[in-house]
Amino acid sequence: MRKRGEAVDRTRQRITDAAVQLHTSIGPAEASMSAVADRAGVTRVTLYRHFPSMDDLFTACMAHWRALHPPPNVERWRTIPDFERRLRTALDELYGWYAQNSDDLYPIYRDAAKTPESNQLARRQANERQAEAILGDLAVTRAGGKRLRAAIGHAVRFWTWHSLARDQGLSTREAAALAGDFVLAASRQGG
């Protein structure tokens, strides 16, 4: 019985690994369930036995990839009392993580609209947690609060880093500094 359970776990892991390989190379839009089964060396029936839906497969794939490539700890950012220092630290760490993992992240973000809704929601929630950690307990009830939240939300996005670092040719540090300057400008403006 134990050997059977271990075999089941190995098969599940092989399928998850295959999904990660495909999602981070050709992208989720091209990584059909059949393609994942082929890459894993299993039948589609076996794949569906382990992952009844694309949603289940994406959840396992994302959890496995993030375990291998943990994002920055947003809770640590919350412990930094000074807003500007918290912002700069967060963007340096986040943009460094994006740079380090950009080859894997690019096809996933490129195909984001074609991923299951739960996956899109998880990505939005991760960005919201990052933005909230940067914002901390800063009072944003004044007129410029909406703009500040929007600026932070924009700054933490993968595509913002990609635009500044890849498209515009800034170093990761320069991109983080410029995004930080953008957020700070929004924090100083009202309405």
Image (spheres, rainbow, N blue to C red):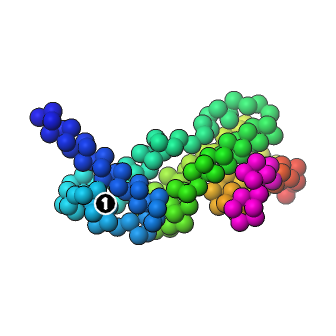
User: Where's the C terminus, which quadrant?
Assistant: bottom right
Q: Residue at x 24, y 52 (%)?
A: 50
Query: 14 or 88, which lies in front?
Result: 14
Q: Look at 46% across and 41% down and name the residue there.
A: 67
Where does label 1 land, which residue? Answer: 39
Query: Dot 1: what SS?
Result: helix
The picture places residue 181, in percent across and down from the top left corner, at 83, 51
Q: Is residue 157 visible?
A: yes
Magenta span has 38?
A: no
In the rendered view, does 109 fall on the left or right side of 54? right
The image position of residue 79, as x and y in percent, is 69, 29
Q: Position of residue 85 (x, y in %)?
A: 79, 37
The answer to whether 173 is drawn above or below residue 5 in the figure is below
The magenta region covers: 165-178
Towards the viewer: 107 or 50 = 107
Q: Which one is in front, 134 or 1?
A: 1
Residue 10 located left or right of residue 113: left
The answer to whether residue 171 is magenta is: yes
Q: Would you say the magenta stretch is mainly helix, strand or loop?
A: helix
